[in-house]
Every structure is written in structure tokens, then in C-alpha cells.
Amino acid sequence: MTTIAVTGASGFCGSHVAAAAAARGADVLCVGRRPGPAGRHVPWDAAREVPDLSGADLVVHCAAAVGDPVPGSPAEATMRAVNVDGTARLLEAAAGRPVVWVSSASVYAPGSGRSPITESHPVRGQVNAYGRTKAAGEALALAAGAVVLRPRAVYGAGDPHLVPRLLDRVRRGLLLLPGPSVPLSLTAVENLTDACLLAAGWPPGAYNIADPEPYERDDALRRVLRAHGVRARIGHLPLPVALALSGAARTSARLRPHAKPALTRYAVEQLARSVVLDVTKATSRGWTARCALLDYTTAVSAR
């Protein structure tokens, strides 16, 4: 029986990977601060310790510090300790075992336009600490011969970030978005999970992971709102205004190191810039995106 160590198995993506691995007959080690949904818990503080990966045949690294911290804040330091230094400790412990490292499309240089982004797109100029630390962490993983997966905006059952933040932005029946609608790639957590469990046999390198087709932003968000029973119309804030507001919010947040800015440049860029991932490299290795946003919204509406 194959033994798979899944880091961050109590989190959103990691819990899906751990549960799917167990359902497919693997012995699962849930490596992290809290137990995962299956298998045996191996305690690990990614910001401080080298994990115990004894008995693991494969490592799927999902553990990460996420968010959009204020530059120079304690949260940014923690993010680096987990996403970069934690990766170095993980690779030390892996000691030659195959590693699948879950990264993010946030590592790509912004301002890509409407052309699909391949894995050769420049990795630079990230707009926040999350993108920078994921880029630094994946550089270590790639140098060590890992398979690196780059999803974008992962959503699905148990999502604690993307959809809850969207719903929280609705005010008096209005959801304000920066700029006009643009095509965007999204990644169903099931599609990422499948890739995590397939990728151990792929050649080392980076692979984009996304749903079968991109979505028009406004249409996709309307579908999500309807599925959650939220009646709201979408309004458009001029992009320069949105960027100016994000700058003002960041300046204000700098005065309160533990506060979260109400609006960030990263959030504006994520919604306003077209980012469509080319997944040809992953599909050429036998991976198929089997889920789409319709599956998610149908499941939510049926609850």
C-alpha cells in the first residue's frame, strides 16, 4: 500500500487531497498542526520544525500561509516562515521522496492580457507577500526536482476564502467589482485534488491546473451568488478608482500592523485582470479537469 504524506491536511485543499487519497486505498499521513479527515496525524509546525515523514512514499505539500498581509507586518513575516522556510524544511525531510508542491498562479507576472498563460510565463513582479513567498517556495521545490502545480482561485466545498469573501462584499444588494468583466480561469478543488494524486509520476517542473474553460467574471459571480441565495446586482467601479482606494486602504492599515486592509491591490488585480491558464502541459500527462463551476453551483443550490 502506498503511503502518502499530505501537509496542511486540515486545510481546504489538503483535506480534499487526504480524503481522496484514503478513498483510493492509500495510507495517509496528515502532516500539520491539526488532524486531517483520514489517516494518521503527524504534528508539524511549518514555521518552526522539520516534519517527520517516516514511512511516506510520496509527499503532497498543501500547507501554506494564505492571505494578503500589510507589507512589513507580523503576518507577512509568518507567511515567509511558512511558505519559504517551511518549504526548505519539508524538502530536507523529504530526502529524495517524490514531492508534489501546490503553488499558485499568483506567482506569474501581472498584466498578462488576454493570451492564455503557459508555464513559461515570467515568474516575477508579484503584487503581494503571498505571491512573492509562493514564488520563492516553489523555486526551492523546483530546484529540488519536485512537481509544482499552479492552480488559480481554488473553490469548492469547504472553501474558507474565495466564496466567503465574495459574499461578504455584497452591500445592500450590490456587489461592486473593479473594471469591466474579463475572462478568468478558476480551479475546482476536485480538479486540483486529481492533479495532486496523479502528478507524482510526471516529470519535474511546473504545471498549470484549472477548469476546462475560462469563465466570464461577472457571469460566474452571478451564478455563485444565485446558488447561495444572495440577491444582488453587479456594479462596476472604474479600475483607477479601485486601485486608488486600495492604495489608501494600505496606507491606513500600515498604521495598525495587525489590521487587515478593507481593499488591497492584490484583490483588485485578481478580479480586474484577465488571467487564463493554458493547461495543455498537465492534460498531456493524462490529467483531465472533470469538474466545473456548474457542478459547484448545482450542489450548493441543492442543499
Image: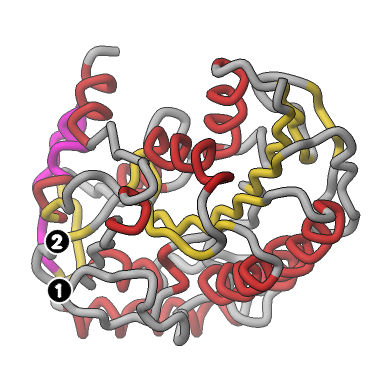
Question: Would residue 228 be visible to someone looking at this image?
Answer: no
Secondary structure under badge 2? strand
* Residue range corresponding to the magenta coloring: 221-236
- Find residue 191 and report its horizontal and vertical position in percent: 37, 38
Q: Is residue 105 left or right of residue 197?
A: left
Secondary structure under badge 1? loop
Q: Which mark is residue 65?
A: none
Give the labeled residue for mark 1: 114
Quadrant assignment, res 263? bottom left
Could you tell me if the residues under marks 1 and 2 are in contact, i.e. CB atoms within 8 Å? Answer: yes
Q: What residue type is disc 1 on?
A: Arg
- Find residue 185 and report its horizontal and vertical position in percent: 25, 56
Q: In which quarter of the image is the N terminus?
A: top right
The answer to which of marks 1 and 2 sits earlier in the sequence is 1
Give the labeled residue for mark 2: 183
Q: In this view, does 111 lie to the left or right of 131?
A: left
The residue sitting at 32% across, 66% down in the picture is 270
The residue sitting at 49% across, 39% down in the picture is 198
Question: Would residue 14 be visible to someone looking at this image?
Answer: yes
